[in-house]
């Protein structure tokens, strides 16, 4: 799994490629933690290159969402989700706690 | 098809490829294949985390049986028995502050497989049997 972060003026765009499971989720958590540790709380996660997402990855997302939404200082939004992953996200009830956009431009533009 | 994997998180990708291949061969569509792969990934994560209590404490044996009805996956480990009924189902409607991501793995397994059965009896370790039914076209 690869994680690349681009810092924009209004938000950070995190592009993940590959497989997010218990072996690789810590790397995603670390990348998200680096952003929030830096005092930035508006984050877009681009899923277009993600092949697989287990509950370990969901845990990293929910943890970061709690940090970002604290004091209304920001939030994590998700975008470009492949159909299988979108189905898992919906099954987990994550639709009610994350905004989901079709493409990264719309997601970045939402901030 | 039977294969044994070291009980560590790095094995998950290989286990995923193994069951992906079996589900593909059984004739499932891409979404059902993904569902099987996710259920097995979550089950193996639970084995490493709960049965073995950490990585590199034992192996995970994975057995895939294809029939005309569907795919049966049997996972076997030599760790401690853990009681799945002790893991509460996640509240998927809870507000963010109360959201816990634990229990989601078991939830996925229960939702996306047609049958799951744990067997912790005996001195030969734990066995988890999961079955996914093949939806036949035209039915």
Image (spheres, rainbow, N blue to C red):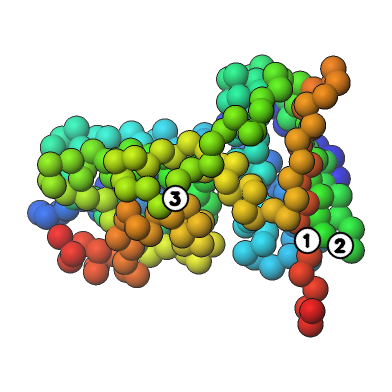
Q: Position of residue B136 (x, y in %)?
A: 80, 73
Secondary structure type for disc 3: loop
Q: Quadrant of residue B118?
A: top right
Image position of B35 with respect to A40: above or below? below
- Residue B133 marker: 1
**Residue drawn at the location 47% of the way across and 52% of the way down:** A92
Image position of B77 with respect to B72: above or below? above
Q: Which residue is mark 2?
A: B69
Which numbered disc, 2 or 3, marks the residue that appears first in the sequence? 2
Q: Position of residue A4 (x, y in %)?
A: 32, 47
Give the quadrant of the N terminus of chain B.
Answer: top right
Q: Is residue A15 left or right of residue B102?
A: left
The chain under label 1 reads B
| Label 2, label 1: how far apart the Cα atoms are | 6 Å
Q: How many marks?
A: 3
**Residue drawn at the location 42% of the way across and 33% of the way down:** A26
| Label 1, label 3: how far apart the Cα atoms are | 25 Å
Give the quadrant of the C terminus of chain B.
Answer: bottom right
Q: Are marks 2 and 1 in contact (CB under 8 Å)?
A: yes
The residue lying toward the viewer, choosing from B117 and A31, is: B117
Image position of B6 with respect to A55: above or below? above
Q: Which residue is mark 3?
A: B92
Q: Are marks 2 and 3 on the same chain?
A: yes
């Amino acid at each position: 799994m690869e994680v690349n972060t681009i810092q924009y003026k209004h938000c950070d765009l995190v592009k993940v490629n590959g497989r997010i499971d218990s072996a690789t989720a810590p790397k995603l958590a670390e990348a998200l933690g680096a952003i929030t540790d830096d005092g930035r709380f508006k984050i877009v996660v681009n899923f277009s290159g993600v092949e697989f997402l287990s509950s370990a990855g969901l845990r990293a997302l929910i943890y970061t969402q709690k940090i970002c939404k604290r004091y209304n200082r920001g939030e994590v939004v998700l975008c470009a989700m492949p159909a299988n992953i979108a189905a898992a996200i919906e099954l987990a009830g994550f639709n009610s706690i994350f905004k989901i956009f079709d493409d990264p431009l719309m997601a970045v533009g939402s901030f | 098809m039977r294969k044994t994997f070291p009980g560590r998180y790095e094995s998950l990708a290989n286990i995923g490829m193994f069951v992906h291949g079996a589900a593909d061969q059984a004739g499932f569509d891409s979404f059902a294949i993904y569902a099987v792969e996710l259920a097995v990934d979550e089950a193996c994560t639970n084995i490493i985390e709960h049965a073995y209590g950490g990585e590199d404490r034992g192996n995970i044996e994975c057995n895939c049986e294809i029939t005309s009805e569907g795919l049966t996956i049997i996972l076997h480990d030599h760790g401690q028995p853990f009681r799945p009924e002790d893991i509460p189902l996640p509240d998927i409607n809870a507000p963010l502050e109360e959201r816990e991501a634990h229990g989601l793995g078991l939830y996925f397994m229960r939702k996306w497989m047609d049958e799951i059965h744990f067997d912790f009896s005996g001195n030969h370790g734990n066995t988890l049997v999961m079955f996914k039914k093949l939806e036949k076209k035209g039915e």
